[in-house]
Amino acid sequence: MKLLLSFLATFFLFFTSYAQTTPEYQKAVDIALGELQKSQCMPCLEAYEKAFAISQHSPLSHLRAARCAQLCQDQAKAEQLAQKAVDINFGVVMRLHNDLVEYPELVPFFESELGKKSLAKAHTAAKKAGYNFELGEKLKILLEKDQRPRLQLEEIEAKYHRDSPEYQAFMRSWMDNDSICLLEAEKIIAQYGYPGKTMVGEYSNVIWLIIQHAPLEKQEQYFPLIDEAAKNGELDKSAWALLVDRIRMDKGQAQLYGSQVVSDPATGKWKFHTIEDEANVNKRRAEVGLGPLEEYAKRMGVEWKQ
């Protein structure tokens, strides 16, 4: 159970860490998206302008804003916003194009001439930066393989008791799957070293995620490689922090960043694994790009007060 709960904490951060936001920013982009979905172009643009006055970190928001500008028939504004999205992160622009089922509001944008030009610019920028498209695709498949049993967990737990043969068989297949993913990750490391942001863009966290799920000896074996990638800006520092916490927890030590969630044997509720110097945890979290622990605790359903 400890493994499963700490995984959920890892899963949550992995898919949200690239977009740390303030409440004011989040409120503005939520309003903007709502206006876009209603095809209200001017209120949409006004809300995005408020958001961008706070932060301009998100390619997704810039592409949505570009679509709003298209609806307002402001081609110059749309081109400016689309170019900004490519400049911020060409890898995310490419991913969004491949994930239009999840982002249907961007379908008209990518079907337009501006969308096609923006995607071409993203590909050109990626090639200039040394992006390895073949390896990126391989890592995408590896990520899907790693996540498959984890995404099935809720359904399996609802259907079978944990002592049932079916549940136990599922858990064995999960562990086997992790072993296979680790072997594939090690082959990639042997060939490329750590495939970071320059080489694979948004998939730079995939090898880290596989190692995060690996046994302690493998985590420690590859920690120097991951540490170097984080120092060189090739891996998110937030991801590095999670591995630090996981290793410390697995060695029976207190964690530093409060990323690891476990079950309390006495109450059955979730709680944070022991945090060293808990009074200063938010300072450490801020240093690696993590939001306040109280916000993280709320999302994870953990009671925590500083």
Image (cartoon, rainbow, N blue to C red):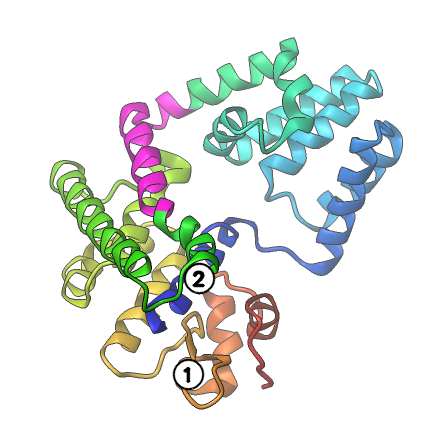
Q: Quadrant of the N terminus?
A: bottom left
Helix, strand or loop for disc 1: loop
Front residue (pair 192, 81): 192
Residue 5 as seen in the image, left or right of residue 131: right
Residue 46 as seen in the image, left or right of residue 171: right
Q: Is residue 129 above or below residue 176?
A: above
Q: Is residue 306 above or below residue 286?
A: below
- Amino acid at the residue labelled 1: Ile
Q: Quadrant of the C terminus?
A: bottom right
In primary-sequence order, the first of circles 1 and 2 is: 2
- Tell me, for residue 286, which label it has, or none: none
The residue furthest top is 113
Does the image show residue 295? yes
Q: Is residue 211 above or below residue 95?
A: below
Front residue (pair 41, 232): 41
- Amino acid at the residue labelled 2: Leu
Q: Position of residue 256 (x, y in %)?
A: 39, 77
Helix, strand or loop for disc 2: helix
Front residue (pair 286, 165): 165
- The residue labelled by disc 1 is 275
Q: Residue at x 61, y 36 (%)?
A: 60
Marks 1 and 2, how far apart at CA: 18 Å
Q: Which residues are magenta?
A: 126-148
Residue 131 as seen in the image, left or right of residue 115: left
Q: Residue at x 62, y 31 (%)?
A: 103
Q: Residue at x 39, y 85 (%)?
A: 276
The image quadrant that residue 134 belongs to is top left
Q: Position of residue 161 (x, y in %)?
A: 39, 65
- The residue labelled by disc 2 is 8
Q: Position of residue 181 (x, y in %)?
A: 22, 45
Which numbered mark, 1 or 2, is in the foreground of this view? 2
